[in-house]
Image: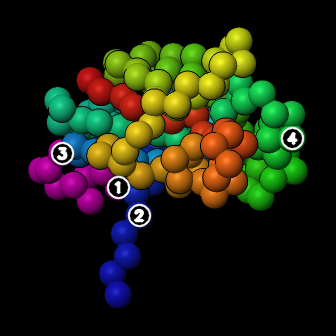
Amino acid sequence: MNSYYLDVTDEACYKKMLGNNKIYKILAEHVFEHLTTEQIKTALHFFYKYSTEDINIRIAVPDGFHTDNKYIEEVKIGGTGYGSDDHKQLFNYQTLGALFEEAGFKSFPVEYWDEQGIFHAGYKDDDKGMIRRSMLHDARNKDGKPHYTSLIMDFTK
């Protein structure tokens, strides 16, 4: 069986995987919080370099503006939740958007908590990529309340 992975910080991986092709869609759910800021900046440089002009990038990460203290305790750097022992970031829509904008992308918040504690549920379908940990798909939200959501953002050139 062949298996492929892309080290988003290694340009040789892009060249090997893509050849002369370009990326037109990227989906990463709960990945970027495991990268340092420098690793993210490197990845975004390569995303820009190796993508088509009509690229859509959908990123989902834990939401640092979530209003539930238990959620924040689970997802923060060194938090108590599964996998959070390796978290290096806790983003909100402003901080994640700023990183992408610095790399030349336009940012579009899709599902997020804002700094006033208001939840914005703009994720209605999976056309740009399915996010399991979302208001729409996570079973913890079956009562219609946003108990476990992600910061979901789309980015374009």
Measured Cα–Cα span from mark 4 to mark 1: 38 Å
Q: Quadrant of residue 82?
A: bottom right
The front one of 8 and 100 is 100
Which residue is denoted by mark 4 in the rendering? 70
Closer to the chain start, of discs 1 and 2, is: 2
Q: Give the quadrant of the C terminus.
A: top left
Residue 128 falls left or right of residue 124: left
The front one of 67 and 83 is 67
Secondary structure found at label 3: loop
Which residue is denoted by mark 1 in the rendering? 13
Measured Cα–Cα span from mark 1 to mark 2: 8 Å
Secondary structure found at label 1: helix
Measured Cα–Cα span from mark 4 to mark 3: 41 Å
Measured Cα–Cα span from mark 4 to mark 2: 33 Å
Residue type at the position of mark 4: Lys
Give the mark toward the camera: 4 or 2: 4
